[in-house]
Amino acid sequence: DGGITQSPKYLFRKEGQNVTLSCEQNLNHDAMYWYRQDPGQGLRLIYYSQIVNDFQKGDIAEGYSVSREKKESFPLTVTSAQKNPTAFYLCASSMMGSTSPQHFGDGTRLSIL
Amino acid sequence: SQQGEEDPQALSIQEGENATMNCSYKTSINNLQWYRQNSGRGLVHLILIRSNEREKHSGRLRVTLDTSKKSSSLLITASRAADTASYFCATDGRSGGSNYKLTFGKGTLLTVNP
């Protein structure tokens, strides 16, 4: 079945540590996105990519980094510069174009040790 | 910045009743989408309505769009306990460079009691 796989489901970060969240899709979508969701809040866009080897900052990119070396993969690194990383992270993909619905993974919950 | 804002923040109804959720937004859009999120899961796309459409149906869902008031509503008819979830509206901006981005509201938490 086609879909988006995020791993791990739960992740713990120590002080000063970088952690990487995985996102893989087999939907043949060009565009991929990373969102952050805090309790009782909507989704805020961290980074997005419309094509391999290219990505753009979203609304809250500080403290995060991404890469897009393959069409299927869009990993997100939460760096030590992100001082409040505890949140639910969601990855999504879509075909190109503003009328395309986004397909979401089931998220990674990141907590601080 | 968050463009869409849902109202109410929370809604509790009995099974079989209808549920109506509203979304307001600030700038011009190409389309508006509604998503559903079960607790601890990712979002699932429900329905998309284009700016030149006024109403759209999909099963028990009915969406309306009023671009003059910059608002949309999602109606779920004959609700079921399985409809319990958070519902989000999402808009795409017409401003340059943001055509592929969606802006999500904070959501409405719907609880359907058996």
Image (tube, coloured by chain):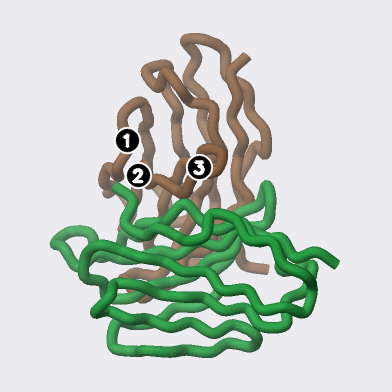
Chain colours: A brown, B green
Question: Nearer the observer, disc 2 or disc 3?
Answer: 3
**x, y percentage for residue B16?**
77, 79
Alpha carbons under labels 2 and 3: distance apart: 13 Å
Quadrant of the frame with the C terminus of chain B: bottom right
Q: What residue type is labelled 2?
A: Tyr
Circles 2, 1 touching at the beta carbon (< 8 Å):
yes
What residue sits 65% from the left and 85% below the top?
Answer: B60
Tell me, yes or no, whether dots 2 and 1 are on the same chain.
Answer: yes
What residue sits 63% from the left and 61% below the top?
Answer: B11
The residue at which mark 2 appears reads as: A47
Q: Which chain carries label 2?
A: A
Q: What residue type is labelled 1?
A: Ala
Q: Is residue B72 visible?
A: yes
Front position in the image: B69 or B61: B69
Mark 2 surroundings within 10 Å by alpha-carbon count, few (fewer than 14), some (14 through 19), many (20 or more): many
Residue A101, quarter of picture: bottom left
Q: Mark 3 lies on which chain?
A: A
Q: Mark 1 lies on which chain?
A: A
**x, y percentage for residue A20?**
51, 30
Alpha carbons under labels 1 and 3: distance apart: 14 Å
Q: Is A101 rendered above or below residue B56?
A: above
Circles 2, 3 touching at the beta carbon (< 8 Å):
no
Mark 3 surroundings within 10 Å by alpha-carbon count, few (fewer than 14), some (14 through 19), many (20 or more): some
The residue at which mark 3 appears reads as: A37
Q: Earlier in the sequence, mark 1 or mark 3?
A: 3
